């Protein structure tokens, strides 16, 4: 039996951690594992996300423009373009 150096709780001889305060009694530093980040896969996923966003934005803009032009004729281009730009900015920043 030995006391914990931090909180003075009596510990058993084979104890590695103090159950009261969590102090490392064994003298061994905790093992850490290194995490390897594959930056190429991360960049590839980022490019894929951008392509998917661009396809979604362009197709939605085309639908909005077509709908505005069918309702208001050529005058529908202005609200259609503005709506498409607003939709694109909302998708980027939200």
Image: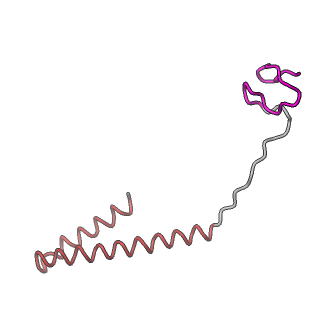
Q: Is residue 34 left or right of residue 86?
A: right
Q: Does the magenta segment cover residue 54?
A: no
Q: Is residue 62 left or right of residue 14?
A: left
In the image, 87 versus 9, the foreground residue is: 9
Q: Residue at x 85, y 34 (%)?
A: 26
Task: Specify start and end residues of the magenta stretch as a single range.
Answer: 1-23
Q: Where is residue 89 in the image (x, y as percent from the top left)?
A: 33, 64
User: Residue 66 appears in which quarter of the rendering?
Assistant: bottom left
Which quarter of the rendered picture does the C terminus lie within? bottom left
Q: Is residue 91 above or below residue 81?
A: above
Q: In this view, does 52 lie to the left or right of 11?
A: left
Q: Where is residue 55 in the image (x, y as percent from the top left)?
A: 38, 76
Helix, strand or loop for the magenta stretch, by majority: loop
In the image, 26 versus 80, the foreground residue is: 26
Q: Give the tally of numbered discs.
A: 0
Q: Which residue is drawn at 16% across and 74% down?
A: 68
Q: Residue at x 75, y 48 (%)?
A: 32
Farthest residue, direction bottom:
74
In the image, 28 versus 20, the foreground residue is: 20
Q: Which residue is drawn at 15% across and 75% down?
A: 76
Q: Position of residue 15 (x, y in %)?
A: 83, 30
Q: Does the magenta segment cover residue 12?
A: yes
User: Residue 92 appears in which quarter of the rendering?
Assistant: bottom left
Q: Position of residue 57 (x, y in %)?
A: 34, 72
User: Residue 13 appears in which quarter of the rendering?
Assistant: top right
Which quarter of the rendered picture does the N terminus lie within? top right
């Amino acid at each position: 039996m030995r006391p914990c150096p931090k909180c003075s709780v009596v510990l058993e001889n084979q104890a590695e951690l103090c159950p009261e305060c969590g102090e490392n009694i064994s003298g061994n530093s905790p093992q850490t594992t290194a995490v390897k980040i594959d930056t190429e896969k991360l960049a590839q996923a980022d490019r894929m996300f951008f392509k998917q966003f661009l396809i979604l934005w362009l197709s939605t803009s085309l639908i909005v423009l077509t709908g505005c032009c069918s309702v208001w004729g050529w005058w529908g281009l202005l609200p259609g373009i503005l709506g498409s730009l607003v939709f694109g900015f909302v998708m980027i920043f939200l």
